[in-house]
Amino acid sequence: MSSQNAPTPLPQFDFDNKDYWAWAKKRELRIQRCTKCRTFRFPPRPVCHACHSFDFKWYKCSGKGAVYSYTIVTHPTHPAFRDKVPYGVVLVELEEGVRMISNVVDVPPDQLRIGMPVEVVFEDVAEDVTLPKFRKTKP
């Protein structure tokens, strides 16, 4: 199957993450924040890992962070990505302290660096799916 015919895998919406994806569609990066102990949590989940409270609110993030770690994908993990290799997959530590996996756009994979400052951008990948990605923060 050629990469043009392979559908791009999309995130699966569920009870815990549907609001996260709805905010992303509006181009807002929001994460859960426990209303009892104020701990941020990502990915979305029903219970705070720090105090076990079920109570939370969606907090609008700054969208800024730094590359905590990365890997360069040289062999496609899915037929839809065959024409995209090599590409970087990054673990971004947001200013709020949580880490999320994504991609950095407009940066060649060989120029990725741990500690590189990044900010969120959004990419529409399907009618109902917008992915948060990151770009290098301009000095």
Image (tube, rainbow, N blue to C red):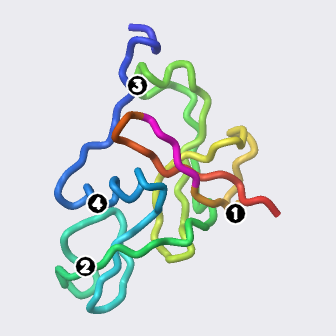
Which tag is nearer the camera, tag 3 or tag 1? 1
Q: Position of residue 68 (x, y in %)?
A: 58, 62
Going by the numbered disc 1, the residue's amino acid type is Pro
**Is-magenta flag for residue 82?**
no
Horizontal placement of 26 versus 108: left or right?
Answer: left
Q: Earlier in the sequence, mark 3 or mark 2?
A: 2
Q: Gap between marks 3 and 1, in whole Å?
A: 29 Å
Q: In terms of secondary structure, where does tag 4 sit?
A: helix
Residue under numbered circle 1? 117
Please name whichever residue, 20 or 114, is drawn nearer the observer in this view of the structure.
20
On screen, residue 37 above or below 31: below
Judged from this view, the residue extending furthest toward the right is: 139
> Do residues under tags 3 and 2 come within 8 Å of each other at their CB atoms?
no
Label whose residue precedes the other's in the sequence (3 or 1): 3
Q: Residues within 10 Å of mark 1 (few under 14, many from 20)?
A: many
- CA gap, disc 1 and disc 4: 27 Å
CA gap between label 3 and label 2 equals 33 Å
Q: Which of marks 3 and 4 is in front?
A: 4
Residue tagged by mark 3?
A: 78
Residue 119 pos. (x, y %): 63, 60
Amino acid, disc 4:
Asp
Dividing the picture into quadrants, the one containing residue 94 is bottom right
Residue located beneath label 4 in the image = 19
Q: Is residue 119 left or right of residue 43?
A: right
Tell me the SS state at disc 1.
Answer: strand
Q: For this view, does 45 lie left or right of residue 32?
A: left
Q: Name the residue under label 2.
A: 48
x and y percentages locating residue 12 in the rendered image: 25, 43
- Asked if residue 124 is among those painted magenta in the image, a careful observer would answer yes
